[in-house]
Image (cartoon, rainbow, N blue to C red):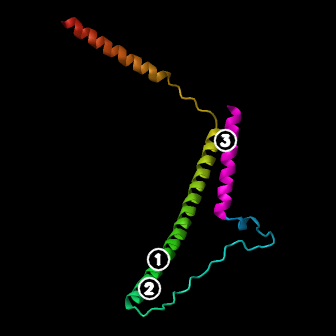
Amino acid sequence: MNRTKGLLAAGTLTGLVLITLLGLGWGNLGATSGSSDTAVPQTVPQEPQLTTTDPAAEEAVQAWQEYSAELEQTVRVMQDRETAYQTQLDAANQTIVNLQDQINSSNSAASSGGYYEDDDDDDRGEHEEHEEYEHEEHEEHDDDD
């Protein structure tokens, strides 16, 4: 049974590797080591050339271009907001780190000052006295009956 599980696992992993290589393509395996630019070059899409004189098609293309421009502007706004939020998060994280450092330094200074032992024996004595007093009150009320 152990051997069967091993063969099944090996076959599964081999299948995953093959699927990954087929999905990504074999061309990505031969990366050049001398290239310092690893970014994928972006291609700017060209505006479609209309070969028809249909006004509805021209309106559709115009609407599509306007929509595309709106989306690009929205993406830019979102990227600007992300940058601003990241800046705020970094500032907040730095503030947290500074406060933690202050707390840690004050805790270490307080702990180096000596050990303070709280004596709770007095509290237990007061509690027992209070219970004895209540017990005596109940006995007095029971005697009245």
| 31 sits to left or right of 107 | right
Residue closest to the eye, 137 or 96: 96
Inspect the magenta stretch and tell me whether residue 19 lies in it. yes
143 shown above or below 107: above
Crowd class of label 2 (few under 14; some 14 to 19; many from 20; radius 10 Å): some
Where residue 119 sits: x, y (%)? 53, 25
Q: Main secondary structure of the magenta part?
A: helix
Q: Which residue corresponds to the image point at 56% horizontal and 55% vertical from the top-left?
A: 96
Badge 1 marks a residue whose secondary structure is: helix
**Residue that label 1 marks:** 71
Q: Are marks 1 and 2 in contact (CB under 8 Å)?
A: no
Q: Residue furthest bottom?
A: 53
Q: CA distance from mark 2 to mark 3?
A: 53 Å
What's drawn in magenta, residue-wise?
1-24
**Residue that label 3 marks:** 8
| 145 sits to left or right of 54 | left
Residue closest to the eye, 46 or 119: 46
